[in-house]
Amino acid sequence: MFQSLSDRLSGILDKLTRRGALTESDVAEAMREVRRALLEADVALDVVRDFIEKVKAKAIGQEVLRSVTPGQMVVKIVNDELVAMLGSENSAIDLHAAPPVAIMMVGLQGSGKTTTTAKIAKRLTDRDKKKVLMASLDTRRPAAQEQLRILGEQTGVDTLPIVAGQTPQQIAKRALDAGRLGGYDVVMLDTAGRIHIDEELMRESAEVRDIATPHETLLVADSLTGQDAVNVAKSFDERVGITGIVLTRADGDARGGAALSMRAVTGKPIKLLGVGEKWDELEDFHPSRVASRILGMGDVVSLVEKAAQTIDAEKATKIAEKMKKGIFDLDDMAEQLKQMQRIGGMSGVLGMLPGMGKIKNQIAEANLDDSILKRQHAIITSMTPHERRNPKVLDAKRKRRIAAGSGTKVEDVNKLVKMHRQMADMMKSLGKNRGMLNRLVGGGRGPGPSEAEMAAMQEELGRLDPKALEQLPQELRDAIPKGGGLPKGLPGLTGGIPKLPGLGGGLPGLGGGLPKFPGLPGKKK
């Protein structure tokens, strides 16, 4: 959602960081460009004006202009003000009330209200171990109640039985009674929407609010509607009173203006972002992390958290035990490829690493996409169980058969086998240091990284390092066009690619840098 804005701001701030000294005119010119970028991103005019004034007042201070790295100081000021604009601290859904806690979902028709209700219910059930009841109060839209019932079956969350002819107010009262009698922790009320805001919608929502007295009233808004989403939020807050906002379709090509303006205009926090259609594609909104993404600093903390949430602890423990014995076969490698896909694939991982936006065109030309992971997995699954456990038996005849079965070339099979051999050697060396291995795998007995450690990792990776490109493996450097105009430095890949829980010492094929995958052009041996 923030890609175009991120590209613009990164380019503007890069010009400042490359200069050894800054004048007031340099800062003023940069701020004019930042103002233009924010307005083009559909951020509200009043919000842009206030943001620019605050940044400018701090950026032209003597302590900034006379500092050793004035450009970096300006970047920090812009980052801090972006965080303040987005809400300073993340606000999770508040369940600190006597059960059943009522959560009322409001919004316009087509914003994804019913699907988001099911996503939140599943999230509360799986992650927070709450007993949740969902109830549809939408008696106008055809099959709206039936839709929520089917979503409840798909997610394994209970739904209130449908009684024909009841009004939304009667359904709300029945849902709360059922919640109390059934011992539910949370009751989610999915209210009706309209094509546009009207008096009848607001009156109905206010009456349901008075009956249910919800602890949380969440507005579901479509981020693709831009500034109109901000106007909708203001209207609902004035008439119904909302406690938070859920932005859907944040994975689309929206310009990000709604997210940047929402908190500043309404004063209500954005609590969740819908980033896909799958049940688990709902993320907490962390202002500091979003600001880091916008400024091209990456979001390594979220990447580590996502890896920790998606890992199968039992499988990770088994792999860890095998690694301690110096064993790492192709079945283990296939499991790591699956884990890579579960945390978002190549695009998801690279999108959260610092500085990747600066070389995205070169990465695209190098064909670093999720098809590589699928091709690798196809090669492994084309082998027999004996071949996967004992890669040394792979001779020329077997490799030709595997290549034909997976729709690849023998060269691809050779590259995969070579990459596996390199990873196996690395695992053997890690096996000698059990404490380190437990922490890297995330499934062993050693503790995983703490919040402080992850924050320190994010800060370290956010620093600019002129030697960062040296982290790239030779294959990727060969694949990048010579005239591509690579940046002189990327923000902080000083320690290589971060080690993610459950991915045995990092990501599959990421030997301390970017991936070395079959199918990438490189030097012929």
Image (cartoon, rainbow, N blue to C red):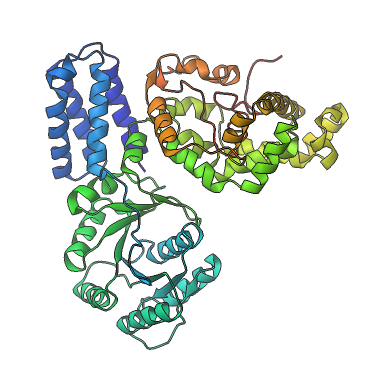
| Residue 217 x %, y % | 29, 65
Q: Quadrant of the N terminus?
A: top left
Q: Residue at x 23, y 76 (%)?
A: 210
Q: Residue furthest bottom?
A: 165
Q: Quadrant of the C terminus?
A: top right
Q: Is residue 40 visible?
A: no
Q: Quadrant of residue 339?
A: top right
Q: Quadrant of residue 324?
A: top right
| Residue 190 x %, y % | 37, 71
Q: Residue at x 26, y 15 (%)?
A: 69
Q: Residue at x 67, y 45 (%)?
A: 315
Q: Residue furthest top?
A: 20
Count of residue discs: 0
| Residue 488 x %, y % | 40, 15
Q: Residue at x 34, y 62 (%)?
A: 96
| Residue 470 x %, y % | 50, 15
For this view, does 444 lie left or right of residue 88? right
Residue closer to the observer: 525 or 337: 337
Q: Is residue 418 visible?
A: yes
For this view, does 34 lie left or right of residue 462? left
